[in-house]
Amino acid sequence: MNGASPLIGDVARPWCNVLARGTIAVQRCDGCGHWVFYPRFFCPACGGRSLTWTLVDGRATLYTWLIAAVPVAPMFAHLDKPILAVAELPVGVRVPTTLVDADPAAVRIGMALLPVFDRETYVDVTLLRFRPAE
């Protein structure tokens, strides 16, 4: 992604740009050290406005999940029962995502996940998805 998409705002553009390079970065407050996700202009812990994008390990654990029996929005109508999930990164932030290459019968809270950088679903946007580590 070149950062030019009108759908991506200034605060989220760095997130999208690092995903396009196949890496993950999360904001960290320069004042109190709190990890911040979703992208924003201030630290929710101390109110500080100095946040630095920091590369983080993409391995995660599954915090929660569900199977969407019906599309959650018209733009997702093409998906057949996606596994919607929240992945917890090692720094403690929780990222909404979808699981890929996962057998729903084998999905378990706490399972190890690896990042998948989906560059094919949408033009000029890289999505962060996860797959089981096993």
Image (spheres, rainbow, N blue to C red):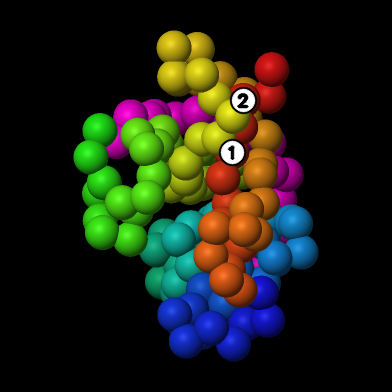
Three-letter amino acid code at the position of disc 2 = Pro
Q: Position of residue 78 (x, y in %)?
A: 37, 50
- Above/below status of 19 relative to 70: below
Q: Secondary structure at mark 2?
A: strand
Kindly tell me whether residue 46 is visible in this rendering.
no
Residue in the picture at 62% in, 25% down: 132
Decide which of 15, 36 is in the foreground and name it: 15
Left or right position of 59 against 97: right
Q: Are marks 2 and 1 in contact (CB under 8 Å)?
A: no
- The residue sitting at the front extreme is 78
Q: Position of residue 113 (x, y in %)?
A: 62, 30
Q: CA distance from mark 2 to mark 1?
A: 7 Å
Three-letter amino acid code at the position of disc 1 = Phe
Q: Majority secondary structure of the magenta segment? A: strand
Which image quadrant: the C terminus?
top right
Residue in the picture at 62% in, 82% down: 3
Left or right position of 70 against 80: left
Does the segment drawn in magenta span residue 65? yes
Which region shows up in magenta?
51-68
Kindly tell me whether residue 100 is visible in this rendering.
yes
Q: Position of residue 27 (x, y in %)?
A: 59, 64
Which of the 4 image quarters holds residue 30? bottom right
Residue at the disc numbered 2: 132
Which image quadrant: the N terminus?
bottom right
- Above/below status of 42 relative to 109: below
Which of the 4 image quarters holds residue 32? bottom right
Residue at the disc numbered 1: 130
Residue in the picture at 35% in, 34% down: 81
- How crowded is the residue under tag 1: few (<14 C-alpha within 10 Å), some, or many (20+)? many
Which of the 4 image quarters holds residue 101? top right
